[in-house]
Amino acid sequence: DGGITQSPKYLFRKEGQNVTLSCEQNLNHDAMYWYRQDPGQGLRLIYYSQIVNDFQKGDIAEGYSVSREKKESFPLTVTSAQKNPTAFYLCASSFRRNNEQFFGPGTRLTVL
Amino acid sequence: AQKITQTQPGMFVQEKEAVTLDCTYDTSDPSYGLFWYKQPSSGEMIFLIYQGSYDQQNATEGRYSLNFQKARKSANLVISASQLGDSAMYFCAMSYSSNYGQNFVFGPGTRLSVLP
């Protein structure tokens, strides 16, 4: 089955720790995106990548980092510099211009 | 700058009735796409419908239709014959070209509650 997987579904982190969220897609999509969603809010773009080994900051990139070493994978690291990381994180991919984004099931990150 | 506005934070509709969720957009890009997504309480984002900026006809997908008024820059979602399972958050989104390729912007969402 083609799709996007995110792991883990729930993640708990202590303050001051870095944590990496996984995002994998087997849809052969070139573009991949990371969004953050706070309760009752819309989606805010963290980082996005249109091709392998290249990515761009979105609206709220501070305290986050990404890599795109493979077309299928776009992991997001939430660093200790992110002051308020507790949120729902969604990964998405799209094939080409004006095609819809396909979303993963999301990861809920809670900082203890 | 590209922007999506959804002015209805919450909407109520009676089961089996139709409901319209508003969306207006702002872009100077002549080529763009408009999307609606549904987000149930589980958190997954479900693609509902797409309208291209050059499409002459309004998009329809089953009970969903998109009322596209280009001159007014509006892309309202119409859900006919509402069902209890339609209760969810609904997001309007737009794809546009940036210096770095395709990008997306989402609206703040509308929470739809279907009443039995």
Image (cartoon, helix red, strand yellow):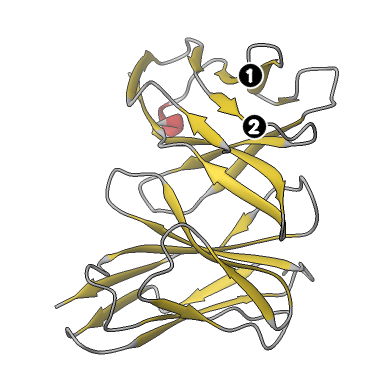
Image quarter of the C terminus of chain A:
bottom left
- Secondary structure of residue under mark 2: loop
At x 63%, y 73%, the residue is: A55
Q: Which mark is residue B8?
A: none
A63 relative to A2 in the view: left or right: left
Residue A18 percent coordinates (x, y): 32, 88
Chain letter for mark 2, please. Answer: B
- Badge 2 crowding class, 10 Å Cα cut-off, few under 14, some 14 to 19, many 20 or more, is some
Look at discs 1 and 2 and give the one toward the viewer. Answer: 2
- Secondary structure of residue under mark 1: loop
Label 1 sits on residue:
B73
Residue type (three-letter) at the residue carrying disc 2: Thr
In-front residue for pair A60/B59? A60
Residue A4 percent coordinates (x, y): 62, 68
At x 69%, y 26%, the residue is: B62
In-front residue for pair B86/A29? A29
Label 2 sits on residue:
B27
Q: Return the disc, 1 or 2, that comes first in the chain's sequence.
A: 2
Q: CA distance from mark 1 to mark 2?
A: 9 Å
Residue type (three-letter) at the residue carrying disc 1: Lys
B38 relative to A62 in the view: left or right: right
At x 40%, y 44%, the residue is: A42
Chain letter for mark 1, please. Answer: B
Residue A94 percent coordinates (x, y): 71, 58
In-front residue for pair B12/B99? B99
Q: Are marks 1 and 2 in contact (CB under 8 Å)?
A: yes
Marks 1 and 2 belong to one chain: yes
Residue A20 percent coordinates (x, y): 42, 85
- Placement of B114 over or under A39, stated as above or below: above
